[in-house]
Amino acid sequence: MPVCDLRQQLLDCKGHALVLGGPGSGKTTIALKKAVVRIGAGMAPGQSVLFLSFSKAAVARVGEATRLEVPKAQRGMLSMQTFHSFFWTLLSAHAYLLGAPKSLRILLPADEQAQYGTIKKKDRNVKNPEWDKWLVERERLFRQDGKIAFDLFAANAVDLLQRSIHVRRLVAQRYPLIIVDEAQDTDANAWRCIELLAPLVQIVCLADLEQQIFDYLPGIGPERIVTIKTSLTPLELDLGGQNHRSGVTDRHIGSIP
């Protein structure tokens, strides 16, 4: 079906972009069409478009949309990952640059809990010698034993990208376009990773301020949108409350489902 003029702006855009819209407004659909356009423009061997989201459920949802919007021959050039899996890919290959062993393993939550015992969540953000002791040990396990806890993924991925232009270039060579789903929920570390890659790749952020998952964290929601606009100076597209899941169309703007 024809694409409206508003969405065509994203398909034609060569720089960064920010797409705002509510549920069913077509953010994922037009982002996947953007991926198809980028793939069609030519990709080097080994390159793909990276689609980042926070949860496996969100990645699965994008996977379902992919089967509808992306031709079968091009699906292999679309990499859908959670932020954590992306961080793990970076660290498992390059954490030795941070002083960790070359062979890295994940410290599973059950094994981590077995080591820090029964310290309750409410006692972890206050002055607690036992919790502070565990944080030091957790860092030692990463640096010396090559065992990394999930909570250390993001901060160390940022450290790695900040320290190494070589790693940033490797990521850019592999992913010339990065689509960030649920961008309003990116925390400081997740967003810093995107910010560090932005000079080398095209970034497309998808955001919905009505569906904030981590709105209790600092910098999330409207603040993150302001940061995105300031940092990327993106093309801004506001799809508003258009809802194509309900079957309602807006002929005035020539919207697509």
Image (tube, helix red, strand yellow):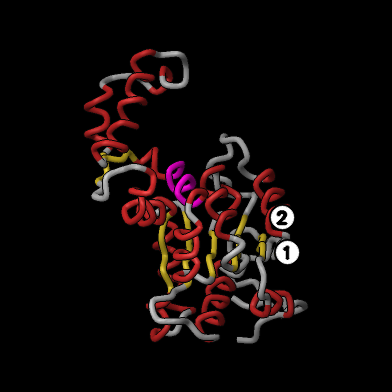
The answer to which of 31 and 132 lies nearer the viewer is 132
Quarter containing the N terminus: bottom right
| Magenta stretch in the rendered image | 154-161
Which circle's residue, 2 or 1, is located before the other in the chain?
2
Foreground disc of the pair 2, 1: 2
Q: Residues within 10 Å of mark 2 (few under 14, many from 20)?
A: some
Q: Residues within 10 Å of mark 1 (few under 14, many from 20)?
A: some
Amino acid type assigned to the residue bearing label 1 in the image: Glu
Residue that badge 2 annotates: 229
The answer to whether residue 246 shows anywhere in this view is no
The answer to whether residue 183 shows anywhere in this view is yes
Quarter containing the C terminus: bottom right
Q: List the single residue furthest toward the right.
A: 252
Q: Position of residue 7 (x, y in %)?
A: 68, 75
The answer to which of 190 and 62 lies nearer the viewer is 190
The secondary element bearing badge 2 is classed as helix
Residue 79 position (above or below residue 154): below
Q: Position of residue 28 (x, y in %)?
A: 55, 67
The answer to which of 192 and 3 lies nearer the viewer is 192
Residue 236: mark in rendering: 1
Residue 116 position (above or below residue 157): above
The secondary element bearing badge 1 is classed as strand
- Magenta stretch encompasses residue 256: no
> Residue drawn at (26%, 29%), measured in percent from left and top?
113
Q: Position of residue 222 (x, y in %)?
A: 69, 45
> Residue drawn at (42%, 82%), measured in percent from left and top?
74
> Residue drawn at (74%, 80%), measured in percent from left and top?
5
Q: Position of residue 97 (x, y in %)?
A: 38, 49
Q: Are marks 2 and 1 in contact (CB under 8 Å)?
A: yes
